[in-house]
Image (cartoon, rainbow, N blue to C red):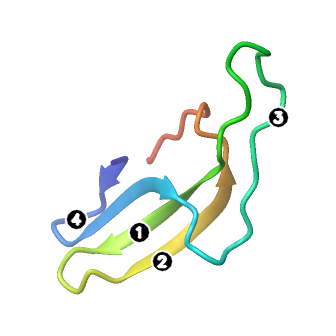
């Protein structure tokens, strides 16, 4: 989870939506290897619907909501 926008909407980072383009990280340590890229999404907690805001996010990247 990243943040609550209010008491209804949640911003979170998760797997890329099935069927959407996906990829792997680059500049990896040879000991660790590549990781699957993620997506930043907003979920309406009352309906369960979500919107993908940003795809192709490196899971090692820090994301801040302001």
Q: Position of residue 36 (x, y in %)?
A: 65, 46
Q: Is residue 52 left or right of residue 9?
A: right
Q: Which mark is residue 42?
A: 1
Disc 3 versus disc 1: distance between alpha carbons? 26 Å
Q: Position of residue 27 (x, y in %)?
A: 84, 26
Which numbered mark, 2 or 3, is in the foreground of this view? 3
Q: Pointer 2 and pointer 1: residues touching (CB < 8 Å)?
A: yes
Q: Position of residue 35 (x, y in %)?
A: 66, 38
The residue at which mark 3 appears reads as: 26
Disc 3 versus disc 4: distance between alpha carbons? 35 Å
Residue 46 figure quarter: bottom left
Q: Position of residue 49 (x, y in %)?
A: 34, 83
Mark 1 or mark 4: which comes first in sequence?
4
Mark 2 or mark 3: which comes first in sequence?
3
The residue at which mark 4 appears reads as: 6
* SS state under label 3: loop
Q: Is residue 25 left or right of residue 2?
A: right
Disc 1 versus disc 4: distance between alpha carbons? 11 Å
Residue 43 figure quarter: bottom left
Tell me: residue 44, above or below residue 32: below
């Amino acid at each position: 989870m990243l943040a609550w926008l209010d008491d209804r909407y949640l911003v979170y980072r998760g797997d890329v939506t099935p069927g959407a383009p996906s990829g792997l990280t680059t500049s990896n340590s040879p000991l660790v290897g590549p990781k699957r890229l993620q997506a930043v999404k907003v979920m309406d907690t009352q309906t369960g619907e979500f919107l993908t805001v940003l795809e192709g996010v490196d899971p090692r990247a820090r994301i801040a909501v302001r």
